[in-house]
Image: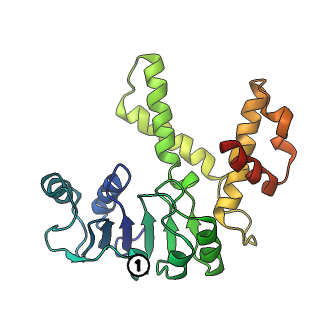
Amino acid sequence: MANEQHVVIQGYGKVGAPLVKLLSDRGHEGCWYRRCEGRIHVPGGINHITMAEHYVEAGTVVGYPAATTSRPDNSFTINSDIAIPAALGGAIDEKVAETMEASIVVEAANGPTTGEGAEMLASRNIPVVPDVLANAGGVVASYFEWAQDLQGFMWETELFQQRWKRRCLSHSTTSGPGPSNSTSPCAKLQWPLAWKRIAEATELRGLSLIQSHNLTEISPERAMFIGVTSCQ
């Protein structure tokens, strides 16, 4: 990601705040940052330390030094390279997707794009990195924390980072966007893979999910349907 790219971030919480730090460390400029109180534009980029201190003191991102403040309308209508919904689910519906100005959407929040929104983005050829991929690093880190709890032993930072990087990179080759001639949204290609892995793990444990759905032998579309209905 080039540091001259413009980024729109929605939300400043457990996801958005660390994201600001990552982008700030890389010197990104033109960050729009939105919360329900208002949205801000920082042409020179957001300094994550200054932002954190300001938020603790003011309880809002509004009023950040050298920032332009405007109404908290649809921030994704702003011309940008990357749009990152990092707040609520369902934030990008069909109407929002229709006016999306970013070149790519990265789903940092859980389920920020509705089905209608996803179809609209796909029709406009705006690629979406789905939450199941964008959040994968955090899920792996949480698993490692759980593993350390079970062991009663904390790993050194270098070991943690080494294992995290190896785990993420080893699966990146099997979770790409699919064949070059595929026009399916990335999420439609990832969910069948995810459910296939769950099915295989379930089968190894001798549980009953495979007996009722046999996820290892069904079509990707059917795997997606079963995945959704199983979660409801």
Report x, y in % for residue 147: 49, 25
Report x, y in % for residue 231: 66, 43
Q: Is residue 154 above or below residue 222?
A: above
Residue matched to label 1: 80
Q: Is residue 23 above or below residue 232?
A: below
Horizontally, residue 190 falls left or right of residue 10, namely right
Residue at x 47% of width, y 77% of height: 102
Q: Nearer the viewer, residue 12 or 139?
A: 12
Which quadrant of the figure has residue 78?
A: bottom left
Q: Nearer the viewer, residue 2 or 70?
A: 70
Q: Residues within 10 Å of mark 1 (few under 14, many from 20)?
A: some
What's the coloring here?
A: rainbow
Q: Quadrant of the N terminus?
A: bottom left
Q: Residue furthest front?
A: 232
Which quadrant of the figure has residue 115?
A: bottom right
Horizontally, residue 64 falls left or right of residue 25, namely left
Residue at x 20% of width, y 59% of height: 51
Horizontally, residue 134 falls left or right of residue 122, namely left
Which quadrant of the figure has residue 190?
A: bottom right
Residue at x 31% of width, y 71% of height: 31
Q: Quadrant of the C terminus?
A: top right
Q: Secondary structure at mark 1?
A: loop
Q: Is residue 171 above or below residue 204?
A: below
**How many labels, in total?**
1
Which three-letter amino acid code belongs to the residue tagged 1?
A: Ser
Report x, y in % for residue 42: 24, 74
